[in-house]
Protein backbone atom coordinates (compact mmCIF):
# COMPACT_ATOMS: atom_id res chain seq x y z
CA UNK A 1 0.00 0.00 0.00
CA UNK A 2 2.79 2.44 0.90
CA UNK A 3 4.65 1.74 -2.36
CA UNK A 4 1.47 2.63 -4.27
CA UNK A 5 0.88 5.77 -2.19
CA UNK A 6 4.47 6.89 -2.69
CA UNK A 7 4.10 6.58 -6.47
CA UNK A 8 0.92 8.69 -6.32
CA UNK A 9 2.57 11.34 -4.14
CA UNK A 10 0.26 10.53 -1.18
CA UNK A 11 1.37 10.54 2.49
CA UNK A 12 2.52 7.14 3.74
CA UNK A 13 0.77 5.16 6.47
CA UNK A 14 2.76 5.18 9.71
CA UNK A 15 1.94 1.58 10.66
CA UNK A 16 -0.58 -1.22 9.97
CA UNK A 17 -2.85 -0.18 12.86
CA UNK A 18 -3.22 3.37 11.45
CA UNK A 19 -3.77 2.00 7.94
CA UNK A 20 -6.53 -0.36 9.10
CA UNK A 21 -8.27 2.23 11.31
CA UNK A 22 -8.10 4.87 8.56
CA UNK A 23 -9.49 2.44 6.01
CA UNK A 24 -12.50 1.60 8.19
CA UNK A 25 -13.30 5.31 8.52
CA UNK A 26 -13.41 5.89 4.76
CA UNK A 27 -16.75 7.30 3.61
CA UNK A 28 -16.10 5.92 0.12
CA UNK A 29 -16.58 2.13 0.40
CA UNK A 30 -14.64 1.53 -2.83
CA UNK A 31 -11.51 3.03 -1.20
CA UNK A 32 -11.98 0.81 1.86
CA UNK A 33 -12.43 -2.22 -0.43
CA UNK A 34 -9.23 -1.40 -2.33
CA UNK A 35 -7.22 -1.57 0.92
CA UNK A 36 -7.79 -5.37 1.16
CA UNK A 37 -8.30 -5.52 4.91
CA UNK A 38 -8.49 -8.93 6.57
CA UNK A 39 -9.75 -10.11 9.95
CA UNK A 40 -9.80 -13.06 12.26
CA UNK A 41 -12.50 -13.47 14.90
CA UNK A 42 -11.27 -14.34 18.40
CA UNK A 43 -14.44 -14.67 20.48
CA UNK A 44 -18.17 -15.44 20.32
CA UNK A 45 -20.09 -12.72 22.14
CA UNK A 46 -23.52 -14.34 21.86
CA UNK A 47 -24.87 -17.55 20.31
CA UNK A 48 -28.27 -19.22 20.22
CA UNK A 49 -29.19 -22.81 19.35
CA UNK A 50 -25.70 -24.24 19.96
CA UNK A 51 -24.21 -25.19 23.33
CA UNK A 52 -20.50 -24.40 23.66
CA UNK A 53 -18.62 -25.32 26.81
CA UNK A 54 -15.12 -23.96 26.18
CA UNK A 55 -13.43 -21.12 24.35
CA UNK A 56 -11.50 -23.50 22.08
CA UNK A 57 -14.79 -25.18 21.11
CA UNK A 58 -16.09 -21.72 20.20
CA UNK A 59 -13.11 -21.02 17.93
CA UNK A 60 -13.49 -24.41 16.24
CA UNK A 61 -17.22 -23.73 15.69
CA UNK A 62 -16.42 -20.31 14.16
CA UNK A 63 -14.00 -22.00 11.76
CA UNK A 64 -16.70 -24.49 10.63
CA UNK A 65 -19.00 -21.51 9.89
CA UNK A 66 -16.42 -20.02 7.51
CA UNK A 67 -14.91 -17.40 9.83
CA UNK A 68 -11.16 -16.96 9.99
CA UNK A 69 -9.77 -17.59 13.48
CA UNK A 70 -6.25 -17.20 14.84
CA UNK A 71 -4.13 -20.12 13.69
CA UNK A 72 -1.87 -20.43 16.73
CA UNK A 73 -4.09 -21.12 19.71
CA UNK A 74 -3.31 -23.51 22.55
CA UNK A 75 -5.02 -24.92 25.66
CA UNK A 76 -3.08 -26.09 28.73
CA UNK A 77 -3.81 -27.79 32.04
CA UNK A 78 -1.64 -25.43 34.14
CA UNK A 79 -0.50 -21.81 34.20
CA UNK A 80 3.20 -22.65 33.86
CA UNK A 81 2.72 -24.27 30.44
CA UNK A 82 0.43 -21.41 29.38
CA UNK A 83 3.04 -18.80 30.31
CA UNK A 84 5.80 -20.75 28.55
CA UNK A 85 3.65 -20.56 25.40
CA UNK A 86 3.41 -16.77 25.83
CA UNK A 87 7.22 -16.61 25.87
CA UNK A 88 7.34 -18.72 22.69
CA UNK A 89 4.91 -16.34 20.98
CA UNK A 90 7.29 -13.49 21.89
CA UNK A 91 10.09 -15.25 20.01
CA UNK A 92 7.79 -15.92 17.00
CA UNK A 93 6.58 -12.30 16.93
CA UNK A 94 8.82 -11.20 14.04
CA UNK A 95 7.56 -14.04 11.80
CA UNK A 96 3.84 -13.30 12.18
CA UNK A 97 1.97 -11.69 9.27
CA UNK A 98 0.53 -9.02 11.56
CA UNK A 99 1.80 -6.84 14.41
CA UNK A 100 1.20 -7.82 18.04
CA UNK A 101 2.32 -6.21 21.29
CA UNK A 102 1.37 -9.05 23.64
CA UNK A 103 -0.56 -12.26 24.23
CA UNK A 104 -3.65 -13.08 26.31
CA UNK A 105 -4.16 -16.01 28.69
CA UNK A 106 -7.86 -16.84 29.15
CA UNK A 107 -9.78 -19.31 31.28
CA UNK A 108 -11.01 -21.87 28.72
CA UNK A 109 -14.10 -23.15 30.57
CA UNK A 110 -17.03 -20.79 29.89
CA UNK A 111 -18.91 -21.81 33.04
CA UNK A 112 -15.89 -20.80 35.15
CA UNK A 113 -15.77 -17.47 33.31
CA UNK A 114 -19.38 -16.84 34.28
CA UNK A 115 -18.55 -17.44 37.95
CA UNK A 116 -15.44 -15.27 37.87
CA UNK A 117 -17.27 -12.34 36.26
CA UNK A 118 -15.70 -8.95 35.50
CA UNK A 119 -14.72 -5.70 37.14
CA UNK A 120 -15.92 -2.39 35.64
CA UNK A 121 -12.84 -2.34 33.38
CA UNK A 122 -11.86 -5.91 32.56
CA UNK A 123 -12.77 -9.59 32.91
CA UNK A 124 -11.35 -11.59 35.82
CA UNK A 125 -10.96 -14.64 33.56
CA UNK A 126 -8.33 -13.16 31.22
CA UNK A 127 -4.99 -11.41 31.58
CA UNK A 128 -2.81 -9.77 28.93
CA UNK A 129 0.96 -10.04 28.89
CA UNK A 130 2.72 -7.14 27.13
CA UNK A 131 5.99 -8.04 25.43
CA UNK A 132 8.94 -5.74 26.10
CA UNK A 133 9.03 -2.96 23.50
CA UNK A 134 11.10 -3.86 20.44
CA UNK A 135 14.51 -2.15 20.59
CA UNK A 136 16.70 -1.31 17.57
CA UNK A 137 20.18 0.17 17.27
CA UNK A 138 20.73 3.25 15.08
CA UNK A 139 22.89 6.36 14.81
CA UNK A 140 22.06 9.73 16.37
CA UNK A 141 22.90 12.19 13.59
CA UNK A 142 21.95 15.45 15.28
CA UNK A 143 19.92 17.06 18.07
CA UNK A 144 17.52 19.81 17.02
CA UNK A 145 15.30 22.09 19.09
CA UNK A 146 11.50 22.36 18.85
CA UNK A 147 9.82 25.35 20.53
CA UNK A 148 6.42 24.57 22.06
CA UNK A 149 3.37 26.78 22.65
CA UNK A 150 4.48 27.72 26.18
CA UNK A 151 8.02 28.50 24.99
CA UNK A 152 9.60 25.25 26.19
CA UNK A 153 12.63 24.21 24.13
CA UNK A 154 12.46 20.45 23.57
CA UNK A 155 15.54 18.68 22.17
CA UNK A 156 14.74 16.07 19.50
CA UNK A 157 17.07 13.37 18.22
CA UNK A 158 17.53 13.10 14.45
CA UNK A 159 18.24 9.43 13.73
CA UNK A 160 19.30 7.25 10.83
CA UNK A 161 15.85 5.85 9.92
CA UNK A 162 15.20 2.44 11.48
CA UNK A 163 12.15 0.14 11.49
CA UNK A 164 10.75 -0.26 15.03
CA UNK A 165 7.45 -1.91 16.02
CA UNK A 166 5.84 -1.64 12.60
CA UNK A 167 6.93 1.83 11.49
CA UNK A 168 10.06 3.76 10.48
CA UNK A 169 11.53 5.95 13.20
CA UNK A 170 13.75 8.91 12.26
CA UNK A 171 13.16 11.16 15.29
CA UNK A 172 12.80 10.73 19.04
CA UNK A 173 12.11 13.23 21.82
CA UNK A 174 14.92 13.83 24.32
CA UNK A 175 12.63 15.72 26.74
CA UNK A 176 15.14 18.14 28.32
CA UNK A 177 18.81 18.78 29.07
CA UNK A 178 18.74 16.74 32.30
CA UNK A 179 17.51 13.68 30.35
CA UNK A 180 20.38 14.03 27.85
CA UNK A 181 22.97 14.38 30.64
CA UNK A 182 21.51 11.52 32.68
CA UNK A 183 21.76 9.10 29.73
CA UNK A 184 25.08 10.67 28.57
CA UNK A 185 23.75 11.10 25.02
CA UNK A 186 26.10 12.70 22.46
CA UNK A 187 25.66 13.66 18.81
CA UNK A 188 27.20 10.86 16.72
CA UNK A 189 26.45 8.10 19.25
CA UNK A 190 24.98 4.74 18.34
CA UNK A 191 21.80 4.51 20.39
CA UNK A 192 19.07 1.98 21.13
CA UNK A 193 15.57 3.14 20.21
CA UNK A 194 12.18 1.77 21.20
CA UNK A 195 8.59 2.98 21.15
CA UNK A 196 7.17 3.74 24.59
CA UNK A 197 3.83 1.93 24.69
CA UNK A 198 4.59 0.87 21.11
CA UNK A 199 3.75 4.45 20.04
CA UNK A 200 6.22 7.20 21.05
CA UNK A 201 9.87 6.74 19.95
CA UNK A 202 12.44 7.15 22.72
CA UNK A 203 16.16 6.51 23.22
CA UNK A 204 16.68 3.79 25.83
CA UNK A 205 20.46 3.93 26.15
CA UNK A 206 23.78 4.60 24.39
CA UNK A 207 26.26 2.03 23.03
CA UNK A 208 29.36 3.63 24.60
CA UNK A 209 31.65 0.86 23.33
CA UNK A 210 31.06 2.19 19.78
CA UNK A 211 32.42 5.66 20.58
CA UNK A 212 35.34 6.92 18.47
CA UNK A 213 36.02 10.21 20.25
CA UNK A 214 34.40 12.24 17.48
CA UNK A 215 31.03 12.42 19.27
CA UNK A 216 29.92 15.91 20.38
CA UNK A 217 28.19 16.92 23.60
CA UNK A 218 24.88 18.76 23.16
CA UNK A 219 24.71 22.35 24.39
CA UNK A 220 21.34 24.01 25.01
CA UNK A 221 21.23 27.28 23.03
CA UNK A 222 21.27 30.57 24.97
CA UNK A 223 18.94 32.12 22.40
CA UNK A 224 15.73 30.79 20.86
CA UNK A 225 16.49 29.19 17.48
CA UNK A 226 13.22 30.62 16.07
CA UNK A 227 13.13 34.25 17.24
CA UNK A 228 16.55 34.83 18.85
CA UNK A 229 15.15 35.80 22.27
CA UNK A 230 17.00 34.89 25.46
CA UNK A 231 16.42 31.37 26.78
CA UNK A 232 16.02 30.93 30.55
CA UNK A 233 15.65 27.98 32.90
CA UNK A 234 13.49 28.85 35.90
CA UNK A 235 14.57 27.61 39.31
CA UNK A 236 13.05 24.23 40.15
CA UNK A 237 12.10 23.48 36.51
CA UNK A 238 13.68 21.02 34.09
CA UNK A 239 12.56 23.04 31.05
CA UNK A 240 14.38 25.83 29.23
CA UNK A 241 12.03 28.50 27.85
CA UNK A 242 12.06 31.16 25.17
CA UNK A 243 11.29 34.47 26.93
CA UNK A 244 9.50 36.00 23.93
CA UNK A 245 5.74 35.36 24.13
CA UNK A 246 5.44 36.63 20.53
CA UNK A 247 7.89 34.01 19.23
CA UNK A 248 6.47 32.65 15.91
CA UNK A 249 6.88 29.03 17.04
CA UNK A 250 4.94 29.70 20.24
CA UNK A 251 2.28 31.57 18.31
CA UNK A 252 1.73 28.74 15.78
CA UNK A 253 1.55 26.04 18.45
CA UNK A 254 -0.69 28.27 20.54
CA UNK A 255 -3.12 28.60 17.60
CA UNK A 256 -3.04 24.82 17.07
CA UNK A 257 -3.96 24.36 20.76
CA UNK A 258 -6.65 27.06 20.53
CA UNK A 259 -8.38 25.18 17.68
CA UNK A 260 -8.02 21.72 19.27
CA UNK A 261 -10.98 19.54 20.27
CA UNK A 262 -10.82 20.19 24.04
CA UNK A 263 -10.38 23.93 23.49
CA UNK A 264 -12.43 25.84 20.84
CA UNK A 265 -13.00 22.65 18.79
CA UNK A 266 -12.62 24.22 15.32
CA UNK A 267 -13.15 21.20 13.07
CA UNK A 268 -10.83 21.03 10.07
CA UNK A 269 -8.20 23.43 11.44
CA UNK A 270 -5.30 21.05 11.98
CA UNK A 271 -1.56 21.72 12.52
CA UNK A 272 -0.63 21.62 8.80
CA UNK A 273 -3.28 24.21 7.91
CA UNK A 274 -2.30 26.52 10.78
CA UNK A 275 1.38 26.34 9.76
CA UNK A 276 0.46 27.09 6.16
CA UNK A 277 -1.65 30.09 7.22
CA UNK A 278 1.21 31.40 9.37
CA UNK A 279 3.71 31.01 6.51
CA UNK A 280 1.37 32.99 4.23
CA UNK A 281 0.98 35.60 7.01
CA UNK A 282 -2.78 35.13 7.06
CA UNK A 283 -2.68 34.78 10.85
CA UNK A 284 -0.31 36.09 13.52
CA UNK A 285 -2.42 35.35 16.61
CA UNK A 286 -5.61 33.49 17.60
CA UNK A 287 -7.90 36.45 16.98
CA UNK A 288 -6.94 36.52 13.28
CA UNK A 289 -8.84 33.25 12.78
CA UNK A 290 -12.11 35.15 13.12
CA UNK A 291 -11.19 37.60 10.34
CA UNK A 292 -10.14 35.11 7.64
CA UNK A 293 -11.53 35.58 4.12
CA UNK A 294 -13.03 32.73 2.13
CA UNK A 295 -11.05 33.54 -1.03
CA UNK A 296 -7.76 33.51 0.93
CA UNK A 297 -8.49 30.07 2.40
CA UNK A 298 -9.67 28.65 -0.94
CA UNK A 299 -6.31 29.51 -2.54
CA UNK A 300 -4.38 27.43 -0.02
CA UNK A 301 -2.86 24.03 -0.77
CA UNK A 302 -5.41 21.16 -0.65
CA UNK A 303 -8.25 23.62 -0.11
CA UNK A 304 -11.06 24.88 -2.35
CA UNK A 305 -14.27 26.87 -2.07
CA UNK A 306 -16.22 24.12 -0.32
CA UNK A 307 -13.43 23.33 2.16
CA UNK A 308 -12.96 27.05 2.81
CA UNK A 309 -16.67 27.48 3.56
CA UNK A 310 -16.67 24.44 5.87
CA UNK A 311 -13.76 25.90 7.82
CA UNK A 312 -15.41 29.31 8.10
CA UNK A 313 -18.60 27.61 9.33
CA UNK A 314 -16.59 25.75 12.01
CA UNK A 315 -14.90 29.00 13.09
CA UNK A 316 -18.28 30.74 13.25
CA UNK A 317 -19.72 27.89 15.36
CA UNK A 318 -16.83 28.17 17.83
CA UNK A 319 -17.97 31.71 18.72
CA UNK A 320 -20.84 30.15 20.69
CA UNK A 321 -18.60 28.08 22.99
CA UNK A 322 -18.80 28.40 26.76
CA UNK A 323 -16.33 30.74 28.48
CA UNK A 324 -14.42 27.79 30.01
CA UNK A 325 -13.40 26.58 26.55
CA UNK A 326 -12.00 30.00 25.71
CA UNK A 327 -10.07 30.18 29.00
CA UNK A 328 -8.54 26.76 28.34
CA UNK A 329 -7.88 27.65 24.68
CA UNK A 330 -5.68 30.60 25.71
CA UNK A 331 -3.07 28.02 26.76
CA UNK A 332 -2.20 29.72 30.07
CA UNK A 333 0.52 27.72 31.86
CA UNK A 334 -0.85 25.28 34.49
CA UNK A 335 -4.46 26.23 33.67
CA UNK A 336 -6.30 23.09 32.54
CA UNK A 337 -9.89 22.30 31.63
CA UNK A 338 -10.90 21.71 35.25
CA UNK A 339 -9.63 25.06 36.56
CA UNK A 340 -11.11 26.82 33.50
CA UNK A 341 -14.54 25.35 34.28
CA UNK A 342 -14.30 26.33 37.96
CA UNK A 343 -13.33 29.93 37.17
CA UNK A 344 -16.01 30.31 34.48
CA UNK A 345 -18.73 28.98 36.79
CA UNK A 346 -17.54 31.07 39.74
CA UNK A 347 -17.01 34.46 38.04
CA UNK A 348 -19.30 34.22 34.96
CA UNK A 349 -17.50 36.69 32.60
CA UNK A 350 -14.02 37.15 31.18
CA UNK A 351 -13.98 40.79 32.32
CA UNK A 352 -14.56 39.73 35.92
CA UNK A 353 -11.78 37.11 35.76
CA UNK A 354 -9.42 39.64 34.13
CA UNK A 355 -10.04 42.09 37.00
CA UNK A 356 -9.09 39.60 39.73
CA UNK A 357 -5.79 39.41 41.57
CA UNK A 358 -3.99 36.08 41.94
CA UNK A 359 -4.86 36.13 45.64
CA UNK A 360 -8.58 36.47 44.88
CA UNK A 361 -8.49 33.61 42.36
CA UNK A 362 -6.55 31.36 44.73
CA UNK A 363 -9.35 31.72 47.28
CA UNK A 364 -11.49 29.53 45.01
CA UNK A 365 -11.36 25.83 45.87
CA UNK A 366 -9.00 23.85 43.54
CA UNK A 367 -7.32 26.95 42.04
CA UNK A 368 -3.61 26.81 42.98
CA UNK A 369 -1.42 29.84 43.67
CA UNK A 370 0.88 29.33 40.66
CA UNK A 371 -2.07 28.81 38.32
CA UNK A 372 -3.71 31.98 39.67
CA UNK A 373 -0.44 33.93 39.24
CA UNK A 374 -0.10 32.79 35.61
CA UNK A 375 -3.72 33.77 34.87
CA UNK A 376 -3.27 37.23 36.41
CA UNK A 377 -0.09 37.78 34.36
CA UNK A 378 -1.87 36.64 31.20
CA UNK A 379 -4.67 39.18 31.59
CA UNK A 380 -2.24 42.01 32.40
CA UNK A 381 -0.24 41.45 29.19
CA UNK A 382 -0.99 44.26 26.70
CA UNK A 383 -0.82 41.96 23.67
CA UNK A 384 -3.33 39.57 25.28
CA UNK A 385 -5.66 42.48 26.14
CA UNK A 386 -5.56 43.52 22.47
CA UNK A 387 -6.31 39.94 21.30
CA UNK A 388 -9.28 39.64 23.69
CA UNK A 389 -10.72 42.92 22.38
CA UNK A 390 -10.42 41.60 18.80
CA UNK A 391 -12.17 38.37 19.84
CA UNK A 392 -14.97 40.41 21.45
CA UNK A 393 -15.37 42.48 18.26
CA UNK A 394 -15.59 39.26 16.23
CA UNK A 395 -18.49 38.08 18.40
CA UNK A 396 -16.75 35.35 20.41
CA UNK A 397 -18.73 34.52 23.58
CA UNK A 398 -17.06 35.80 26.74
CA UNK A 399 -19.58 34.56 29.32
CA UNK A 400 -20.42 31.42 31.26
CA UNK A 401 -23.38 29.63 29.70
CA UNK A 402 -25.69 28.66 32.53
CA UNK A 403 -27.13 25.17 32.13
CA UNK A 404 -30.88 25.42 32.74
CA UNK A 405 -30.66 22.20 34.79
CA UNK A 406 -27.77 23.45 36.93
CA UNK A 407 -28.07 23.64 40.72
CA UNK A 408 -25.69 23.91 43.65
CA UNK A 409 -26.91 20.53 44.91
CA UNK A 410 -23.42 19.01 44.79
CA UNK A 411 -21.48 22.12 45.75
CA UNK A 412 -18.03 21.24 47.08
CA UNK A 413 -18.61 17.47 46.95
CA UNK A 414 -15.85 15.17 45.66
CA UNK A 415 -17.54 12.26 43.88
CA UNK A 416 -16.01 9.04 42.54
CA UNK A 417 -17.83 7.15 39.76
CA UNK A 418 -17.38 3.38 39.52
CA UNK A 419 -19.08 0.66 37.49
CA UNK A 420 -21.54 0.92 34.58
CA UNK A 421 -24.43 3.36 34.97
CA UNK A 422 -27.80 2.72 33.25
CA UNK A 423 -28.27 4.44 29.87
CA UNK A 424 -25.70 7.17 30.41
CA UNK A 425 -21.99 7.56 29.61
CA UNK A 426 -19.26 8.33 32.14
CA UNK A 427 -18.58 11.72 30.48
CA UNK A 428 -22.26 12.69 30.72
CA UNK A 429 -22.29 11.96 34.45
CA UNK A 430 -19.06 13.92 34.98
CA UNK A 431 -20.71 16.91 33.26
CA UNK A 432 -23.79 16.55 35.47
CA UNK A 433 -21.59 16.55 38.57
CA UNK A 434 -19.64 19.62 37.45
CA UNK A 435 -22.77 21.49 36.27
CA UNK A 436 -24.18 21.10 39.77
CA UNK A 437 -21.15 22.34 41.67
CA UNK A 438 -19.38 19.05 42.45
CA UNK A 439 -16.09 17.63 41.25
CA UNK A 440 -15.49 14.19 39.75
CA UNK A 441 -12.34 12.55 41.10
CA UNK A 442 -10.63 9.40 39.89
CA UNK A 443 -9.71 7.56 43.08
CA UNK A 444 -11.24 6.89 46.49
CA UNK A 445 -9.60 8.46 49.55
CA UNK A 446 -10.60 9.75 52.99
CA UNK A 447 -11.39 13.09 51.30
CA UNK A 448 -14.01 11.48 49.01
CA UNK A 449 -17.55 12.58 49.90
CA UNK A 450 -19.60 10.17 47.74
CA UNK A 451 -19.13 7.10 45.55
CA UNK A 452 -21.63 6.75 42.70
CA UNK A 453 -21.70 3.00 42.03
CA UNK A 454 -23.17 1.23 39.02
CA UNK A 455 -23.20 -2.40 37.91
CA UNK A 456 -19.97 -4.41 38.15
CA UNK A 457 -18.36 -1.82 40.43
CA UNK A 458 -14.90 -3.05 41.40
CA UNK A 459 -12.08 -2.15 43.78
CA UNK A 460 -13.19 1.49 44.24
CA UNK A 461 -16.48 0.29 45.74
CA UNK A 462 -14.67 -2.09 48.09
CA UNK A 463 -12.30 0.69 49.23
CA UNK A 464 -15.22 3.08 49.81
CA UNK A 465 -16.95 0.43 51.95
CA UNK A 466 -13.77 -0.12 54.00
CA UNK A 467 -13.43 3.66 54.59
CA UNK A 468 -17.11 4.08 55.46
CA UNK A 469 -17.75 6.53 52.59
CA UNK A 470 -21.37 7.03 51.55
CA UNK A 471 -22.30 4.99 48.46
CA UNK A 472 -25.24 5.91 46.20
CA UNK A 473 -26.76 4.45 43.04
CA UNK A 474 -27.75 6.39 39.92
CA UNK A 475 -31.40 6.87 41.00
CA UNK A 476 -30.28 8.38 44.31
CA UNK A 477 -27.83 10.59 42.43
CA UNK A 478 -30.63 11.95 40.21
CA UNK A 479 -32.78 12.64 43.29
CA UNK A 480 -29.94 14.70 44.76
CA UNK A 481 -30.08 16.91 41.66
Image (cartoon, rainbow, N blue to C red):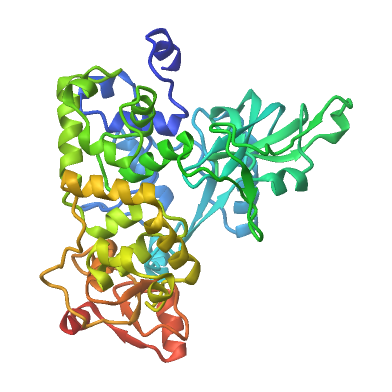
Q: Is residue 184 left or right of residue 439?
A: right
Q: Is residue 278 left or right of residue 205?
A: left
Instruction: State the image coordinates of residue 444 (x, y, percent, origin top left).
Output: 44, 78
Residue 249 or residue 50, whichever sits in front: 249
Is residue 372 shown above or below 271? below
Quadrant for the N terminus in the image = top left
Question: Would residue 195 be seen by someone viewing this image from the given angle?
Answer: no
Q: Is residue 171 left or right of residue 127?
A: right
Instruction: State the image coordinates of residue 128 (x, y, percent, origin top left).
Output: 52, 53
Residue at screen point 72% across, 43% down: 180
> Residue 70 occupies which quadrant of the picture?
top left
Residue at screen point 36% across, 40% down: 255
Question: Would residue 140 be seen by someone viewing this image from the given angle?
Answer: yes
Instruction: State the image coordinates of residue 165 (x, y, percent, origin top left).
Output: 57, 33
Residue 69 or residue 360, whichever sits in front: 360
Is residue 308 shown above or below 290? above
Instruction: Point out the residue furthest to the left here.
Output: 404
Is residue 358 shown above or below 308? below
Amino acid sequence: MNESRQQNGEPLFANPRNAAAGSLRQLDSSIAASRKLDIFVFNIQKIEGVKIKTHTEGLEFLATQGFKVVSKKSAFKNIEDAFNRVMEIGKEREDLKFDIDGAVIKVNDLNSREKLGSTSKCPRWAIAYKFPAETKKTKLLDIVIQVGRTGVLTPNAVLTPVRVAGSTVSRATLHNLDYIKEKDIKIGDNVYVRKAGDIIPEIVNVEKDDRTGEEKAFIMPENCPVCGAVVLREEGEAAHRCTNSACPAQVVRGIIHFASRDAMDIEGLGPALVEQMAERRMISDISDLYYLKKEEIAEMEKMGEKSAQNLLDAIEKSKENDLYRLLFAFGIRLNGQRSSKILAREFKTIDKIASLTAEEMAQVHEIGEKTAQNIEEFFKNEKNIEIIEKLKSAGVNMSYIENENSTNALSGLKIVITGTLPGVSRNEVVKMIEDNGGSSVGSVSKKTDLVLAGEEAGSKLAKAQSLGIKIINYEEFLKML
